[in-house]
Amino acid sequence: MDDEVARRLVHASGAILPTAWVVGQLDAVPELPWQVVRYVLVLATVSALTLEVIRLFVGLDWAIFEKLTREYEQENLAGYALYMFGGTFAGLLFVPEVAVPAMYMLTIGDPISGLLGSGELRRVKPLRVLGTMFAVSLTFAVPFLPIAAAVAAAVAATLADGVKPVVATYVIDDNLTIPILASATAAAVLVATGEPVDAVVTGFV
């Protein structure tokens, strides 16, 4: 299998966790408590960061790293660790109705956008790719959010995915920024339109 397709499939597999929570909301299926989802996110993030510390500072020559990481990630924190951190940020800080669509934008929207863009690194993605990312993001946001918050979150995710800012020669990875910007933007719109803060932002315990 082409390495780029393999990366996208692994990327999309992250949708399993939020989907398990969504399916658990159905009466006929055992519920997966959101707190359990959050513990899984924390465990996955800690595991990813531990592997990255070992890979970067000790040495971890696993073939899977060669296949699933890009050349520019060899000496930097890999995208999968940033992916875990971004998703965990959304899951820990916000209620499921905010966090879940942000996770879908990362796990489903981003790989679709990446395949359309052929995995090429550009400062700004082509318009058709931006449009597709927005459409996919909005599709996943509408079932969970009021339309104003859904549109705002989809725009934020599209900008995070489609525009690559560079800070001190380092390209800001959209694996980190998509869920953070999408969830934070949705939450801000919800609060601005009358939702109480404690109904949008939540604590870990």
Image (cartoon, helix red, strand yellow):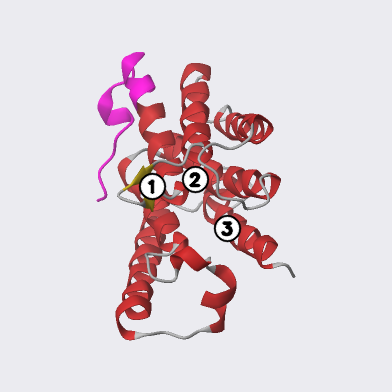
Q: Quadrant of residue 64?
A: bottom right
Q: Amino acid at mark 3?
A: His
Instruction: Pick the residue in front: 178 or 124.
Output: 124
Is residue 14 visible in the rendered image? The answer is yes
Is residue 27 visible in the rendered image? The answer is no
Upstream in sequence: badge 1 or badge 3:
3
Q: To which residue does mark 1 refer?
A: 91
Q: Secondary structure at mark 2?
A: helix
Q: Secondary structure at mark 3?
A: helix
**Image: 72 above or below 133:** below
Q: Amino acid at mark 2?
A: Met
Closer to the observer: label 3 or label 2? 3
Please tell me how crowded label 2 is: few (under 14), some (14-19), or many (20+) other residues with Cα within 10 Å. many
- In the image, residue 130 lies at what x, y percent? 61, 32
Q: Secondary structure at mark 1?
A: helix
Residue 203 on the magenta span: yes
In-image side of 166 versus 135 (left or right): left
- Residue stretch in magenta: 188-205
- In the image, residue 95 lies at what x, y percent? 38, 38
Residue at (44% x, 35% y) in the render: 182
Closer to the observer: label 1 or label 3? 3
Q: To which residue does mark 3 refer?
A: 11
Q: Are marks 1 and 3 in contact (CB under 8 Å)?
A: no
Q: Quadrant of residue 44?
A: bottom left
Q: To which residue does mark 2 refer?
A: 103
Instruction: Pick the residue in front: 16 or 23.
Output: 16
In-image side of 201 versus 131 (left or right): left
**Image: 6 above or below 130:** below
Q: Amino acid at mark 1?
A: Gly
Q: Residue furthest right?
A: 1
Q: Are marks 2 and 1 in contact (CB under 8 Å)?
A: yes
Residue at (55% x, 57% y) in the render: 14
